[in-house]
Amino acid sequence: MITEQADLRAFHAQRIAEFRANGGKLDPPLDAVPLLVLTTTGARSGRQHATPMSYTTDGARIVVVAAAGGAPNHPAWYHNLVANAEVTVEVGDETFQAQATVANEPERSRIFAQHAAQRPNFVHFQRRTTRRLPVVVLERVWVLTSPPAPPRRGEG
């Protein structure tokens, strides 16, 4: 198990490096599915953890599903964002802060069906486990900046 976790961490680290080096894209054959990098704050450690994952959209919102391939337990990134919903999202060559919200019914079912229609493997992941796969909505946090100061007399 420890070797599998270490192998998975190494695989993710390679994908993240490739993603960042290529302006938010992976090389074939891994480029077929839109990918983002989600950075959460560790629930216990307080450290930053970056995780690559596929996503879909629901309007302007980004949707990710805590599937872990249909494993019996939620992935670590899910526990982290439940503890601290402020996350960083990298999509393409853009990086922004977002607020993560776990969708409740009936929205959860609607969004999961929409997500699974585009990513059929998530139907398989749900069938592999007895837990209900959490659907997480990521909404951009818009940072307001102060307007520029008016020009001083004689300037402008």
Image (cartoon, rainbow, N blue to C red):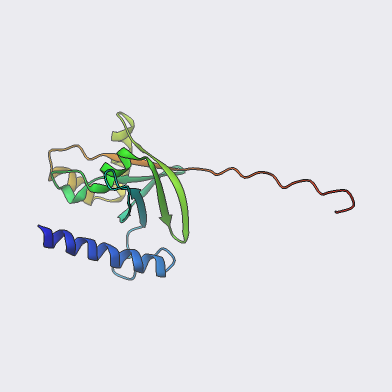
Q: Quadrant of residue 36?
A: bottom left
Could you tell me if residue 90 is visible in this image?
A: yes
Q: Where does residue 60 sit, x and y in percent of width and height? A: 46, 43
- Along the line of sight, which residue is nearer the eye, 79 or 124? 79
Q: Where does residue 19 sit, x and y in percent of width and height? A: 37, 65
- Please state, as top left, top right, bottom left or bottom right, where the C terminus lies in the image: bottom right
- Please state, as top left, top right, bottom left or bottom right, where the N terminus lies in the image: bottom left
Could you tell me if residue 30 is visible in this image?
A: no
Q: Quadrant of residue 137?
A: top left
**Numbered disc total:** 0
Q: Residue furthest right?
A: 154
Q: Residue furthest left?
A: 1
Q: Where does residue 24 sit, x and y in percent of width and height? A: 41, 63
**Looking at the image, which residue is at 25% across and 45% down?**
66
In the rendered structure, the answer to whether residue 89 lies left or right of residue 53 reads right
- Along the line of sight, which residue is nearer the eye, 96 or 60? 96
**Looking at the image, which residue is at 88% across and 48% down?**
153
In the rendered structure, the answer to whether residue 67 lies left or right of residue 89 reads left
In the rendered structure, the answer to whether residue 133 lies left or right of residue 49 reads left
**Looking at the image, which residue is at 30% across and 38% down?**
82
**Looking at the image, which residue is at 79% across and 46% down?**
150
- Along the line of sight, which residue is nearer the eye, 139 or 148? 148
